[in-house]
Image (cartoon, grey):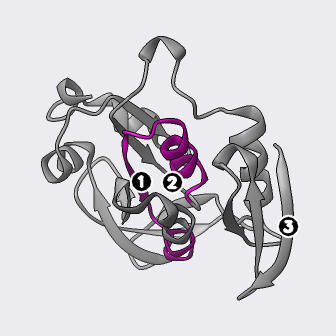
Amino acid sequence: ARVARASERADGWARLRLRPLGGREVLVRPGTSDLGTVWGTFARGYHLPPPELGAPDTIWDLGANIGLTMAHFAELFPRARVLGVELDDENVALARRNVAAWGNRCQVIHAAVWTRDGDVSYRGWPGGTSNYQVTEAGDGTSVRAVSLAELVREHGGPVDYLKIDVEGAERELLRDGSGWAEDV
């Protein structure tokens, strides 16, 4: 990744200006997996749509983490509306700050993308800040759970590009395409 420069910390966060984001500033938490996320997003480009897709108008980032892929999508596709869903409240707050430069084209939803609507509990894996596991009710932090079908009902379609990185629950989410697949 081409990091233009890092500056002093604000509220314990490091400020990075990233060339792939037009030199815009993002915030990361030192000593966490956030810097690995910067590397994975901008050096590896794991999240990018295939070139044959063209320029998507609607992009969903399920498992948005701190919003870096959302920001990159917004920068690469200036007409696109980017919706991110993230379960962890600290990540949600940071993601909202990191995508603020793209105004109302980016929206971060605080929820867990799950196989059913309702609530789930989660906790972080030991030593990590971006890896989570769903737990038994009451064992961890509770968050709203939203299915893909409910996301389509709430936010409409069609969705031109769907990026999913939700800690191994991808198979379960994609197993039943009823109520959403025709809109993606």
Q: Position of residue 105 (x, y in %)?
A: 36, 53
Q: Residue at x 47, y 11 (%)?
A: 52
Q: Residue at x 53, y 18 (%)?
A: 50
Residue contact between numbered discs 1 and 3, judged by CB atoms under 8 Å? no
- Relative vertical location of residue 164 with respect to residue 54 in this rendering, above or below: below
- Relative vertical location of residue 53 with respect to residue 70 in this rendering, above or below: above
Q: Callout 2: helix, strand or loop?
A: loop
Marks 2 and 3, how far apart at CA = 22 Å
What residue would you read off at disc 1?
84
Q: Residues within 10 Å of mark 2 (few under 14, many from 20)?
A: many
Q: Position of residue 19 (x, y in %)?
A: 74, 47
Residue 80 on the magenta segment: yes
Q: Residue at x 42, y 25 (%)?
A: 55
- Relative vertical location of residue 107 with respect to residue 142 in this rendering, above or below: above
One can see residue 33 in this view: no
Q: Write down the region rendered in magenta.
A: 67-94
Give the residue type that dot 2 points to.
Ala
- Relative vertical location of residue 62 with respect to residue 128 in this rendering, above or below: above
Marked residue nearer the N-terminal end (1 or 2): 2
One can see residue 48 in this view: yes
Marked residue nearer the N-terminal end (2 or 3): 3
Q: Residues within 10 Å of mark 1 (few under 14, many from 20)?
A: many
Question: Which one is closest to the eye, mark 2 or mark 3?
Answer: 3
Residue contact between numbered discs 1 and 2, judged by CB atoms under 8 Å? yes
Q: Which numbered tag is attached to residue 64?
A: 2
Quadrant position of residue 90: bottom right
Give the residue type that dot 3 points to.
Ala
What residue would you read off at disc 3?
6
In the foreground, 106 or 12: 106
Q: Callout 1: helix, strand or loop?
A: strand
Marked residue nearer the N-terminal end (1 or 3): 3
